[in-house]
Image (cartoon, helix red, strand yellow):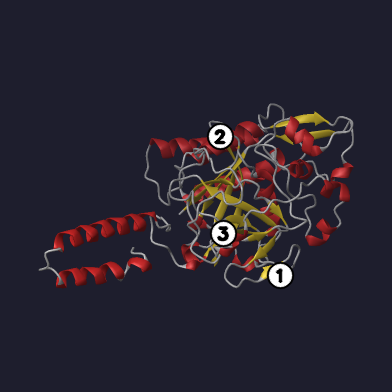
Amino acid sequence: MVLQSQSRRPLARSRHMYRRGRSRKLWPTAVAVIVLAVAGLGLVKLWPHQTSTEAPAPLEETAGDGVMREESRVARETPPVSPETVKIAQGGRGDRANATAEARARIEPPAAIANEADRERGDTPVQTALGTDGSDRSVVRAESPMPPVAKSNPPPGPDRTRAQQRVESGLDLLARNKPLEARRALSRALLSGSLDEFESDRTREQLRALNERLVFSPEIVENDPYTQAYIVQPNEFLSTIVKDQGLAVDWRFILRINGIREARNVRAGQRLKLISGPFHAVIDKSAYRLDLYLGRAPNLVYVASYPVGLGEFNSTPTGLFQVRVNSKLIDPGWTNPRTRQYYASKDPENPIGERWIGLQGVDEHNRDLVGYGIHGTIQPESIGRQSSMGCIRMLPEDVEIVFEVLVEGASTIEIRP
């Protein structure tokens, strides 16, 4: 690239020097031209420009939906492994509007996820660096705990046979009322990646039904490595219980699994079920599905699956991600990066819906992408299709659960082709 201020002058001088080439003063002029040329090259190299390993893609393929504005009612996530932003009631906007002042008072003031410069770049190919919102750019590459992609027709062999045997063993353990052992066996079969698509789907359904009891109900099964009983102490809040117990979940998830509608209903002396986390997600673009997992290897277990909508023209990026620092928002305001139309918090026409989870890539090819996230939608018909500007859409009741269990510093989100 040549600066505009240098595009004509050196060339004009070059022609002038050529016409005077027979002059006895040619050599000092030639030296001057060389000096000017070297200086010009140096300025070109120093001129700021965008560096990307790939050619900029069209807007539809790169600009995520996530151009947010700071709102007074937007909730912010707490520092790593002490989350605190999500849902109290399982109803719609009307239910949340009736949530108590006490519950809302515990939500910290919002932090903008993008400054004005970020908003100005919202309608351009998103290849800018992270950190412009004040968040910590240092990201430790987390290894994905997710299973291999299931093959549509895996070849026969010892791995396939072993996985099928684990499924049969899991079903037998379930019939003998050994839910923890059954979940472990079925999860290991699924995580092996050796089941075909039909077998994998059937195993997911069996595990999902099992986890309605083990994860989403108040029941605590003895020796469950991910749950514990806790007696609420006087003057304790759920947010402080989550922090003090080192739980990698949002405190509102504790409300959900204990069947408690509002935080003010928690009383001293009450017995609660706590779940430790962390949760992880894998998004299979080819299946339009988000799978949720709990724990860490080698004890990782499958929890549930949810349908998703993806970016038009296959624009949803792939790779490993974490939750972007201070990006989890409730009822966020949103500016459409294409039309610049602004939707206020709680606007029923807001396409983002009621939840936003910002994503930050940790792979070499995706760590500089901004504006992408997981969010709700007011268009349920877009689930299972490529309709967004690159983000992952979920049904409102599904994104509320995912919002509650994915936290900074603990959860990974892997997006696969």
Among numbered discs 1 and 3, the one appearing first in the sequence: 1
Secondary element under disc 1, as helix, strand or loop, is loop
Q: Is residue 248 left or right of residue 283?
A: right
**Residue 349: assigned label:** 1
- Rendered-image quadrant of the C terminus: bottom left
Indicate the amino acid at tag 3.
Cys
* Residue 133 appears in the rendering: yes
Secondary element under disc 2, as helix, strand or loop, is helix
Place of residue 26 in the rendered image (x, y in percent of width and height, measured from the top left): 15, 63
* Residue 168 appears in the rendering: no
Mark 2 to mark 1: distance in Å?
45 Å
User: Residue 270 versus residue 234: which sits nearer the camera?
Assistant: 234
What is the crowding at mark 3: few (fewer than 14 residues within 10 Å), some, or many (at least 20)?
many
Indicate the amino acid at tag 2.
Ala
Residue bearing the label numbered 2: 185
Indicate the amino acid at tag 1.
Glu
- Rendered-image quadrant of the N terminus: bottom left
Place of residue 407 in the rendered image (x, y in percent of width and height, measured from the top left): 64, 42
Q: Is residue 383 above or below residue 211?
A: below
